[in-house]
Image (cartoon, helix red, strand yellow):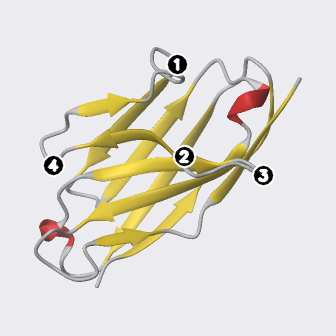
Amino acid sequence: QVQLVESGGGLVQAGGSLTLSCAASGSIFRRITTMGWHRQAPGKQRELVATITQGGTANYADSVKSRFTMSRDNAKNMVYLQMNGLKPEDTALYYCSADTPSLYPYVTWGQGTQVTVSS
């Protein structure tokens, strides 16, 4: 089974930057296909921020395009989310996810890391 641990969250002023990391442990990392970053603000539904394929192709939500960059290091079992130009509306709990379409539970979630952007 895959375990995911996020880190790198914190408090930053508007316009600042943060880099989130997600470490995937477990002997089946090679069976992970797409990985993603999601976020959930208080009182709102969880939303998809970015995804990245095994081959490194990333896609982004319109709200973060040109500001956020997702990357993946398969050798280190890590994914990252570089966040620039942060806005107060980016404040949320950020979660990492991993898809294992050939292995239950098919989608694994981390516990999340808090990002707070002050105005």
In terms of secondary structure, where does tag 1 sit? loop
Using the rendered view, name the quadrant where residue 100 is placed: bottom left
Label 3 sits on residue: 42
Tell whether label 1 touches label 2 (CB within 8 Å): no
> Is residue 73 found left or right of 119 in the rendered image?
left
Residue 92 screen position, x and y as percent: 70, 46
Nearest-to-viewer mark from 3 and 4: 3
Mark 2 vs mark 1: in front:
1
Q: CA distance from mark 1 to mark 4?
A: 22 Å
Task: Tell me whether circle 3 and circle 2 mark residues in contact (CB < 8 Å).
Answer: no
Give the position of the N terminus as an image quadrant: bottom left
Separation of marks 2 and 4 at Cα, in angstroms: 19 Å
Q: Which mark is residue 117?
A: none
Marking on residue 67: 1
Is residue 32 or residue 45 the one in the foreground? 45
Q: Quick one: label 2 or label 4, which is nearer the N terminus?
A: 2
Rendered residue at 20%/56% (across/down): 75
Q: Residues within 10 Å of mark 2 (few under 14, many from 20)?
A: many
Residue type marked 2: Leu
Q: Compare marks 3 and 4 and give the one earlier in the sequence.
A: 3
Q: Is residue 117 visible?
A: yes
Circle 1/circle 4 CB separation < 8 Å: no
Mark 2 or 4: in front is 4
Q: Which residue is mark 4?
A: 54
CA gap, disc 2 and disc 1: 14 Å
Q: Secondary structure beneath disc 2? A: strand
Q: Residue 62 vs residue 31: left or right?
A: right
